[in-house]
Amino acid sequence: MNLKEHIVTIPNFPKEGIMFRDVTSLLDDKDTLKESIDSLIKVIGKTKFDKVVGPESRGFIFGMPVAYALNKSFVPIRKKGKLPREVISQEYDLEYGTSTLEMHKDSIKKGDKVIIIDDLLATGGTMEAMTKMIESLGGEVVKICVLIELPDLNGRKLLSKYDVESIIEFEGD
């Protein structure tokens, strides 16, 4: 199945000049949803890891079922002010602004091997922020898996020291 054909592109969202790749169209159909999760599990392969980390909100959608299927725990990373316990924070640049991510301070233990799962890799700012938080708590990012990569935005370059896998690429369109 070609998942790329099922992703809806919305021009000029959330602002002028952005081509938004809407992965929620993959959720509308049981077959594309299953293929999306199965594809992420396949690229993880035999990687040894302890936890799946996923950012709000689409990282939750794709990371949770992967964690469940592989019998691993899931660590949510949320936008500022959304988590109830003691947190660590990391500010980062987006393709269209800045934001802050937070995670519970006790969610990653020293030596935890972590896979990050998200829907999209663009400039790499969100991923870089997550890797910094994970590593500041003593965790090791052993793989980053995304459904979509936008290679023209060079996010992979920012993450060059990590094993990054993507399922679909949208180049310059």
Image (spheres, rainbow, N blue to C red):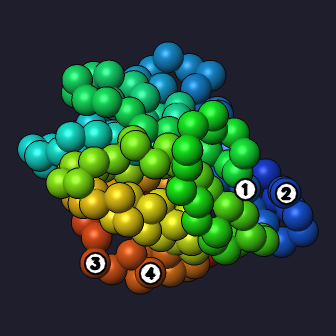
Q: Residues within 10 Å of mark 1 (few under 14, many from 20)?
A: some
Horizontal relation, residue 6 to residue 131: left or right: right
Q: Earlier in the sequence, mark 4 or mark 1?
A: 1
Q: Earlier in the sequence, mark 2 or mark 4?
A: 2
Residue at the location (49% across, 75% down)? 155
Q: Amino acid at mark 1?
A: Phe
Residue contact between numbered discs 1 and 2, judged by CB atoms under 8 Å: yes
Horizontal relation, residue 37 to residue 152: left or right: left
Between residue 145 and residue 28, name the one nearer to us: 145
Horizontal relation, residue 52 to residue 172: left or right: left
Q: Distance between the Cα atoms at labels 4 and 1?
A: 21 Å
Please state the horizontal and vertical placement of residue 151, each as a whole percent of the image.
49, 74
Q: Quadrant of residue 53?
A: top left
Between residue 100 and residue 9, name the one nearer to us: 100
Residue contact between numbered discs 3 and 2, judged by CB atoms under 8 Å: no
Q: Residues within 10 Å of mark 2 (few under 14, many from 20)?
A: few
Q: Is any part of residue 171 visible from this angle?
A: no
Q: Amino acid at mark 2?
A: Pro
Residue 162 bears which disc, if any? none
Residue depth check, mark 2 versus mark 4: number of the one nearer the observer: 4
Q: Distance between the Cα atoms at labels 2 and 4?
A: 23 Å
Q: Which residue is mark 1?
A: 20
Q: Distance between the Cα atoms at labels 3 and 4?
A: 8 Å
Q: Which residue is mark 3?
A: 161
Q: Earlier in the sequence, mark 1 or mark 3?
A: 1
Residue contact between numbered discs 1 and 3, judged by CB atoms under 8 Å: no
Q: Which residue is mark 4?
A: 158
Q: Which residue is mark 2?
A: 14
